[in-house]
Structures are given as structure tokens and as C-alpha cells.
Image (cartoon, helix red, strand yellow):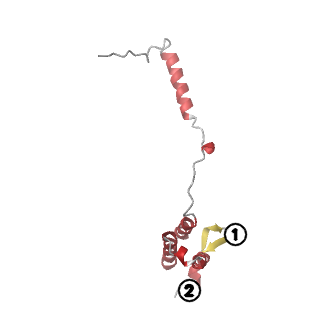
Amino acid sequence: MKPVTVWAPPFDDLILLPGEREIVTLRDAGDYITSLPKAEQNLDEWQAAVEALLLIVELSGPTLMARIGVMRALNRGYVREFDSSRKDTHWGKRKLKRAADEWCQENDPEGVVFEYEVIEE
């Protein structure tokens, strides 16, 4: 049996749970997972989180891996939606267009460089 101190390391960033609860240490994560209903514990996402927790405890690895496992299990049903209102405008295209227009004015004042004739056979 592992000493309690092995389960004591805190996560780099705490994990917020619904209901204003939080997971701070590996032990908190283990207690939370064991408090879940058996059907939910048996889901692949929670099994992966448990496996990550056990590897961290047994091999003294980085707690970030266990945190990622728990976060993925907590957010397993969440699908991010694209919000086009948050999309930043890409100003580079505007600069390229302006530079192309300036080049054309300087080097082709008559505008004949981009004229072409379609030859039909």
C-alpha cells in the first residue's frame, strides 16, 4: 500500500467542479472518481483518468498528465462551437492588396500587364 504522502501532491492548476467544488490534490481526484456512480466510472474517459492517476502515484510523474485525464473525462460531452464574431480580422490580405495596387500604379500606369486575350480554338 502506498503512503498517503504519495497522493498529496497538488495539481499545478486546480480543477473546478460543478457546484463550486474543486480538485486540488491527486487524492481529491481519486476520491471524486470513486464517488461517481459505477456506470460513469466504467466509461473509457474515466478509466483513462484513473490510469493516469495511478501512473503518477506509482512512478512519481508530472501531475499535469493526471489533470489532463480528469479534465478530458469531465468535458467528454462538450463540443466547442465556432463563434464567428470572435474571429480576428486578418489585416495581412489588406496590406498585400495595397502593395499590389501600389506596384501596379508605379510599374504599369496604363494597366495593361493584367490584360489578356482569350484564344478560342
Q: Position of residue 59 (x, y in %)?
A: 48, 77
Which is more N-terminal, label 2 or label 1?
2
Judge the density around disc 1: few (<14), some (14-19), many (≥20) Cα neighbours within 10 Å. Answer: few
Q: Quadrant of the C terminus?
A: top left
Name the residue nearer the viewer: 78 or 103.
78
* Secondary structure category for the residue under label 1: loop
Name the residue nearer the viewer: 106 or 37.
37
Q: Is residue 14 above or below residue 121?
A: below
Q: Residue furthest front?
A: 39
Marks 1/2: CA distance?
A: 30 Å
Q: Position of residue 106 (x, y in %)?
A: 51, 16
Q: Position of residue 71 (x, y in %)?
A: 57, 66
In which quarter of the view is residue 10 placed?
Answer: bottom right
Judge the density around disc 2: few (<14), some (14-19), many (≥20) Cα neighbours within 10 Å. Answer: few
* Secondary structure category for the residue under label 2: loop
Indicate which disc residue 3 carries. 2
Give the amino acid type for the residue marked by disc 1 in the picture.
Answer: Gly
Q: Is residue 104 above or below residue 53?
A: above
Q: Is residue 12 above or below residue 5?
A: above
In which quarter of the view is residue 117 placed?
Answer: top left
Indicate which disc residue 19 carries. 1
Give the amino acid type for the residue marked by disc 2 in the picture.
Answer: Pro
Q: Residue furthest left?
A: 121
Indicate which disc residue 120 carries. none
Are circles 1 and 2 on residues that touch, CB within 8 Å? Answer: no
Residue in the image at 56% along x and 81% along y: 6
Q: How many numbered tags mark residues here?
A: 2
Q: Position of residue 32 (x, y in %)?
A: 61, 76
